[in-house]
Every structure is written in C-alpha cells, then in structure tokens.
Amino acid sequence: MRLSTLYPSACAALLAGLLATAPQAWAQTAQQGTAADAATPSTAATPASPYVMPATQVWDMPSDNGEVYRIFVSAPDKGEPPKGGYPVLYVLDGNAYFGSFAQARWVQDYLPVGKAIIVGVGYPGDKAWDVRRMADYTAQLREPLSPEVRPFAKYKSGARAPFLDFLTGKLRNEIAQRYPVNLERQSLFGHSFGGLFALYALYERPQAFEAIVAASPSMEWNGQSILDEERVFRDKVQAGKLGATSRLMVVVGDRDADGDPESARMLAERLEALSGWGLRVRLQRYPNEVHASVPAQAANDTMRFAFTLR
C-alpha cells in the first residue's frame, strides 16, 4: 500500500513544504553565486602597465658639447659572447627605429645574427623624431637658400661633425665599457636624413665603421651638396689614398614619394665602379615600400649585412 494512501494529509503537507521552500533555496543559491562573482577580480579591471622589451636597457648620455642623447641597447643576456666580442650596430633615430631592430635581434638570439648588440641613438622624450636630428645629420645650409630648404632655415643645422665625434668616440667607449664588444666590427644604420649622415660618415671617415647602411638617403637636401663630398671621396679612393673602407649597403623603397629611388640606384652604381679599389657596395630595393616603411622592412637585411662575416 502506498504511503500517500495511508497518510494523504502528510504527503500533501510535504509537497506543499517543498514547493514553498524551493524558491527561497534558489534565491539563496543565486545570491551566493553573485557574491562569489563579486569577490573575484574582473580581468577588465586589472590595471595595465607599459610594455618593456626583454634584453634591453636605456639611459641618457651627454656629449662633450652638452647635447643629451637617449641611448637604447638590445644585447644578449645569456650565453658567452663570440670570440673577440659582440659586433655592434648603431641605429640613428633610435626613438623611431630601435624597437624594430631590437625585436628582430631578440627573436633570433639563438642564431649567429642575434649574437650582437643594437645601439639606438635618439633623444629624450616619447616622440618618434626630434627636430635636433636636422642639426646632427646635416651640413650647414648653403647660401643663398634654395626654395625647398627655406622653411627649415629657422632650425639649427650643421652639427654633423661633433655628432660623428660623439658616435665614434664617447658613445663607442661607453658601450665598450658596459658590454664585451668587438671594436673592429662597428656598423651604422641611418634612414632619410640619417641615411644622408651615413653617407657623410663614409666619405668623411671611411674606416670608422666596418659596414654602413644608408636607407632612403635624402641626397636632394641642401642643393645636393652631398654629391660634392662624394666626388672628393671617389677621387681619394681612385688615387689610392684611403686603403680599406666601410662596406656600404644602399636601401630604398621603389614607392618612396619623399625621395627619388633612381638617385639611390645611381649612387650605388657610381660607387660600385670603385670595387677595383676595394669598395664593396650593395643595393637593396623593396618594390612595395614607401619612405616611412623602409626601416622596418630593412631591419633583418641590415643585421645580416652588418653581422655576417665576409
């Protein structure tokens, strides 16, 4: 006999009690879940922090004439340095371009090309470019001023000689004190005005760097005055007055609207004609790159050119 037959009133009361208490139990469970959720921190509320690239350092450093530069360094942080020390690549406009070169070196740390040091040379502050670069990378403006440079006459120019002294003197010595480097394997990368400066470094001090990369060099600047220095340099090479010189790679984007890709090509051809006197020149063209995109595209090719022994 079923229990409900014997005790109909008791069963009804039990069922009524269950139905009456269930909503309270569900509500209590829901409240407990809500409280638990509230106690768990939301990932959206986690404060963000700046990203710091591994295996890098940064500091500010004055030159002998009082100009302050921001120095960025990417260096291997494990393992033994190669025999003779790490090769070094100095990257101009470090605020803008150091990140691309540092990342390319870091992810290839296990390869020979990554066993090197990248030194970005920039300026205090968070801007990609600083107006001081015009002074550091260019010659004094010619008089009378050509129409294209008149808007820039209000800015300082013509400090490239002391800047080259800083790169090859005080800064190079500081890097050598902080890291085990190979002083015979120092290279330079510059883009745009920095590329123009890279050519000046080659013409002015042909033995200062083992390799130089001039990317989209602004050779049209200042009435193409860099061509006069190129002619003097070529005459010295052909006269046998220089001996060994830096290796040179000229880099250009074929869609560069801020410079003439053909000028870079013709430069490489003119200097390639000096190969009989020991000058080694390479032209690297990027068909789909514009002026601003050339440096990031060139990072790996530059490191291979600078760090691969030939």
Image (tube, rainbow, N blue to C red):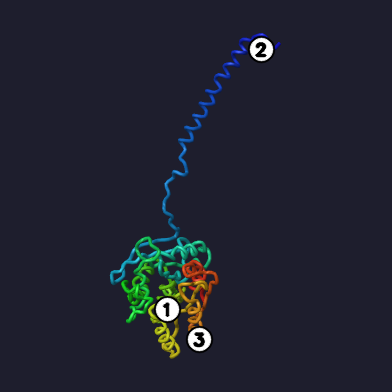
* Numbered disc 2: secondary structure: helix
Earlier in the chain: of badge 3 and badge 2, it is: 2
Residue 173 appears in which quarter of the rendering? bottom left
In the image, residue 217 sits, relative to residue 20, either above or below, namely below
* Residue at the image position 51 percent from the left and 72 percent from the top: 253
- Please state, as top left, top right, bottom left or bottom right, where the N terminus lies in the image: top right
Q: Nearer the viewer, mark 1 or mark 3?
A: 1
Question: Which dot marks residue 4?
Answer: 2
Name which of mark 1 and mark 2 comes first in the sequence: 2
Residue tagged by mark 1? 220
Residue 66: image x %, image y %? 28, 69
Q: Residue at label 3?
A: 273
- What is the distance, in whole Å, between disc 1 and disc 3 at their CAs? 22 Å
Quarter of the image where one finds residue 163: bottom left
Sort mark 1 into few (<14), some (14-19) or many (20+) by Cα contacts within 10 Å.
Answer: some
Camera-nearest residue between 106 and 202 = 202
Mark 1–mark 2 distance (CA, rounded to whole Å): 104 Å
**Which residue is depicted at the point 45% across and 40% down?**
41
- Going by the numbered disc 2, the residue's amino acid type is Ser
Alpha carbon distance from label 3 to label 2? 111 Å
Q: Residues within 10 Å of mark 3 (few under 14, many from 20)?
A: few
Residue 288 pos. (x, y %): 54, 69
Q: What amino acid does circle 3 point to?
A: Ala
Is mark 1 in CB contact (under 8 Å) with mark 2? no
